[in-house]
Image (cartoon, grey):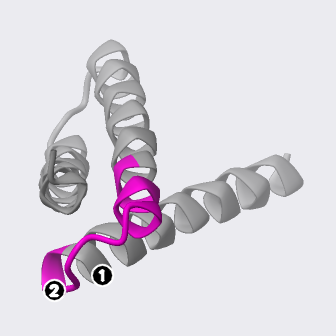
């Protein structure tokens, strides 16, 4: 199995879901899409780690998939911390 391809695909899906969130106004849909994006993000990060562990051939998909998912996770965590500190 080629984990780097799945990591890259899931990164693209998370980007598309985050763009979709901008256009939603219903809180229920917003929550469901947000949870789905978070789960996909975690799976993308896991596939990126597995790609490095299995020493798959390096290309742009491997690095963009792993680094992109990691950056989105860090941004999400920082946003949650910032929101928590404001309240």
Q: Which mark is residue 38?
A: none
Q: CA distance from mark 1 to mark 2?
A: 7 Å
Q: Position of residue 29 (x, y in %)?
A: 27, 19
Quarter of the rendering occupied by the N terminus? top left
Is residue 59 part of the magenta span, yes or no?
yes
Q: Nearer the viewer, residue 9 or 23?
A: 9
The residue lying furthest to the bottom in this view is 59
Q: Residue at x 55, y 67 (%)?
A: 75
Boundaries of the magenta span: 47-61
Q: Which mark is residue 63?
A: 1
Q: Position of residue 76 (x, y in %)?
A: 55, 56
Q: Position of residue 13 (x, y in %)?
A: 15, 48
Total marks drawn? 2
Is residue 64 part of the magenta span, yes or no?
no
Q: Residue at x 47, y 63 (%)?
A: 53
Q: Is residue 61 left or right of residue 28?
A: left
Q: Which mark is residue 59?
A: 2
């Amino acid at each position: 199995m080629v984990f780097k391809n799945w990591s890259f695909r899931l990164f693209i899906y998370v980007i598309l879901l985050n763009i979709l969130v901008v256009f939603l106004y219903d809180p229920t849909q917003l929550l469901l899409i947000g949870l789905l994006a978070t789960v996909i993000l975690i799976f993308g990060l896991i596939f990126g780690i597995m790609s490095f562990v299995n020493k798959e051939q390096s290309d742009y998909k491997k690095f963009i998939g792993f680094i992109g998912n990691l950056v989105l996770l860090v941004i999400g965590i920082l946003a949650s911390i910032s929101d928590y500190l404001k309240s």
